[in-house]
Image (spheres, grey):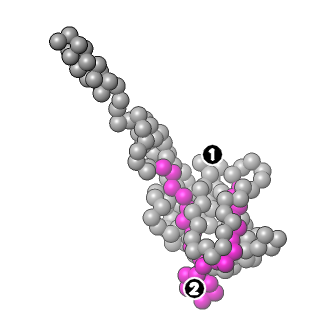
C-alpha cells in the first residue's frame, strides 16, 4: 500500500512540474516582409533569377535568397534600434543591384514566457534608392503583423 501511495504521489508531482509556458508551441514570431513581383504591364509575374541580400547592420549585406523562378520572397527585417532595413535585389550574380530601403516604426509585443517578445512593424515605406533591375515599387500593406498579406510589389 505504501508503494502505491508513493508511486501515485510521484506521478502527481511529476505531472505538476511542467506548465504550458515552458515551450513555445504557437507560431507567434516576428513576421517577415512579403514581396511579390510585377512586370512592365503591371501583371504579377515570376522572376527568372533572383538574388536578395539584406544589410543587417554589420557592414556587409547577407545573402538570404538565391533562387530561380521566384514568385514571392519573405524578408526578415532588422529588429535592432535602426528605423530602416536596406535590401538589395539582383537578377544576375555579376549584374547591377537595386537598393530598396524599407523604413518603419517598430512595436515590441510580449507573447509568453517561453516565446518572449515579437516585433510588429507599422508605417512601412519603401524607397528605391538605386534602380535597375527594379524599376518601381508599389505599396500594398503598410503594417506588418503577420505574413498573410503582400506588403510591396516590385516592378521589373
Query: Which mark is on residue 104?
Result: none
Residue sitting farthest toward the left: 1
| Residue 9, horizontal then vertical, whole percent | 25, 18
Nearer to us in this view, 1 or 151: 1
| Residue 95, horizontal then vertical, whole percent | 80, 73
Left-right relation of 110 to 2: right
The residue at 26%/23% (across/down) is: 12
In the rendered image, the quadrant that contains the C terminus is bottom right
Residue sitting farthest toward the right: 94
In this picture, is 16 found above or below 62?
above
The residue at 20%/16% (across/down) is: 4
- Determine contact: label 2, label 1, CB under 8 Å: no
- In this rendering, the label closer to the viewer, 2 or 1: 2
Q: Which residue is mark 2?
A: 42
Residue sitting farthest toward the top: 2
In this picture, is 96 found above or below 15?
below
Question: Is residue 43 within the magenta segment?
Answer: yes
Q: Mostly what secondary structure, the magenta segment? A: strand
Which segment is the magenta one? 29-55
The residue at 17%/12% (across/down) is: 1
Residue 96 appears in the picture as rendered: no
Q: Could you tell me which secondary element the residue under label 2 belongs to? A: loop
| Residue 57, horizontal then vertical, whole percent | 71, 49
The residue at 63%/76% (across/down) is: 69
Residue sitting farthest toward the bottom: 41
Q: Which residue is mark 1?
A: 81
Query: What is the C-alpha distance between the residues marked 2 and 1?
Result: 35 Å
Residue 3 appears in the picture as rendered: yes
Question: Is residue 33 within the magenta segment?
Answer: yes
Amino acid at each position: 500500500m505504501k508503494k502505491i501511495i508513493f508511486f501515485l504521489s510521484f506521478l502527481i508531482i511529476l505531472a505538476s512540474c511542467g506548465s504550458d509556458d515552458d515551450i513555445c508551441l504557437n507560431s507567434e514570431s516576428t513576421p517577415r516582409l512579403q514581396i511579390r513581383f510585377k512586370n512592365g504591364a503591371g501583371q504579377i509575374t515570376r522572376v527568372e533569377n533572383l538574388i536578395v541580400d539584406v544589410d543587417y547592420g554589420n557592414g556587409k549585406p547577407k545573402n538570404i535568397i538565391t533562387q530561380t523562378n521566384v514568385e514571392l520572397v519573405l524578408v526578415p527585417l532588422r529588429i535592432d534600434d535602426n528605423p530602416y532595413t536596406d535590401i538589395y535585389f539582383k537578377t544576375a550574380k555579376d549584374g547591377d543591384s537595386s537598393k530598396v530601403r524599407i523604413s518603419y516604426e517598430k512595436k515590441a509585443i510580449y507573447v509568453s514566457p517561453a516565446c518572449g517578445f515579437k516585433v510588429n512593424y507599422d508605417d512601412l515605406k519603401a524607397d528605391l534608392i538605386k534602380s535597375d533591375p527594379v524599376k518601381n515599387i508599389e505599396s500594398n500593406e503598410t503594417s506588418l503583423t503577420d505574413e498573410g498579406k503582400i506588403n510591396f510589389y516590385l516592378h521589373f
